[in-house]
Image (tube, rainbow, N blue to C red):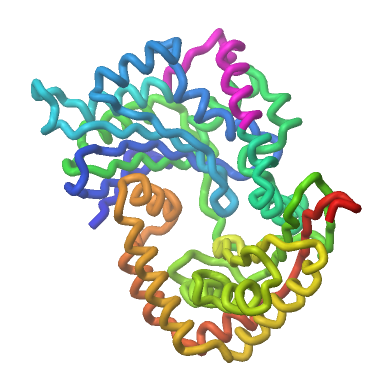
Amino acid sequence: MPQKFDLCEGVEGLYVEDSRFNTTLVSFNFYMPLKSEDYADYALLPYLLSSCGEEYPTFRELNTRLGNLYGATIIAGAYKYIDYQRISISISVLNDRFSLCGEQVVASAANLLASLIFAPSLEGERFKSADVERERAQMLDRIRGEINNKRGYARSQTLSLMFGDDPFGMPRYGKEEDMLRVSGESLFSAWSKMLREAYVQVSVVGERFPDDVFSAAASAFSAIKRENITKFRGYNLPRFADKQTVCERMDVKQGKLVMGFSLGRADCEEKMADVMVMADIFGGGPYSRLFTNVREKLSLCYYCACAAVKSKGVMLVDSGVKAENAEKAQKEILAQLEIMKKGEFENEQFESSIRSLCDSIKSRNDCQESIFSWYATRVFDDSLKSPEDLIEAVCAVTKEDVMRAAQNVSLHTVYSLMPQEGNE
């Protein structure tokens, strides 16, 4: 059973005991309000912090130290989570009992991670220009890579249209023009503010309770003047932008059709298990309505899938289509939704969905990164629901629950990405 406790004001420790793995995962997660003006800085910051530090000013020196820690690895990233941006830096390291000379490898790795976070490589009150330029160049490659992934790009564009000025509609890595404005000074300001104001989760997934890791983290944060600490504001249905139907033309061979729906409510997964089952029967596995009818029976698309962002009250249906089939596919997707609303889906589809979802949830215990991610996205849940709790909630869903969940769904935005005219 996971253990959660306060380390100091606005900083919690989370320990998940698991002896199945040969490694321990130590993670620092910082939660800041999701804002457009500093989104790019926080998107870049974890990659910059994890690449060098005051003690290890070059990546080569840092990599040498990681090698000396039996090949420890650092994982970094920034993610959207409800109305927050989660800045995450983690280290995975061999368990102490496997060290050759009895070294305290986990504590050493955690100290290394803390040194990168609390003592970065700076020039006065700015990050070094060479480090910023290096990491920004890689981030720009990620941003451009997102655009080249046309399926992901179409989904991102749909969310942007739906959310309008709400920063949740921002692309995962931010916009290129915003990233180009990031500077050593703006990153220093964002880093300082993060240490002062973020709600922080220090999590450890491993076989031994890491009292030394938590004690060191508590001391480090207690030395900082913490103020205006980020607080949870609840699961609120966002103010969507005006409904839109948009067609964008690009040099693509296969068209993309994405339909953005409102779920009519927003909440955590456990309280929206009915939505999970509804979305899965509608467009999840090969047993779903969209797969068996829109794709297989009518051959209106190359793929057709559904995914719900339950914490934001959104559901996306995305498909790959020929331009001449886009309107037919859209009508058929809506027709299948009406079947869901009437509860006319088959018992076999319902049962297949329950089994598939339970298997998928069970798999979240298969690796340390997915265990850590599970609790990182439940940081404001005092009850510490486990994957097993979600399985129990899913198994309690009835066909009537699914039908009622579908009845709350309404179409908001339709976005299509089609070949240039004359190239269909």
Looking at the rendering, in which quadrant would you find the N terminus? bottom left
Q: Is residue 86 left or right of residue 105?
A: right
**Residue 97, position as x, y percentages in the image:** 11, 33
Q: Observer-nearest residue: 272 or 354?
A: 354
Q: Observer-nearest residue: 329 or 117?
A: 329
Q: Observer-nearest residue: 158 or 103?
A: 158
Q: Is residue 396 left or right of residue 32?
A: left
Residue closest to the far left: 101
Q: Is residue 38 left or right of residue 348?
A: right
**Residue 314, position as x, y percentages in the image:** 63, 64
Can I make out residue 256 in this image? yes
Whether 343 is among the magenta residues is no
Residue under the point 57% across and 22% down: 135
Looking at the rendering, in which quadrant would you find the C terminus? bottom right
Does 236 sit above or below residue 41?
Answer: below
The number of callouts visible is 0
Residue under the point 72% across and 25% down: 180
Does 344 sit above or below residue 288?
Answer: below
Residue closest to the far right: 422
Residue under the point 53% across and 82% down: 402
Q: Observer-nearest residue: 419 or 179?
A: 419
Q: Range of the magenta residues?
A: 118-141
**Residue 408, position as x, y percentages in the image:** 64, 79
Whether 123 is among the magenta residues is yes
Can I make out residue 314 in this image? no
Residue under the point 62% across and 23% down: 136
Quadrant in the rendering for residue 312: bottom right
**Residue 7, position as x, y percentages in the image:** 32, 39
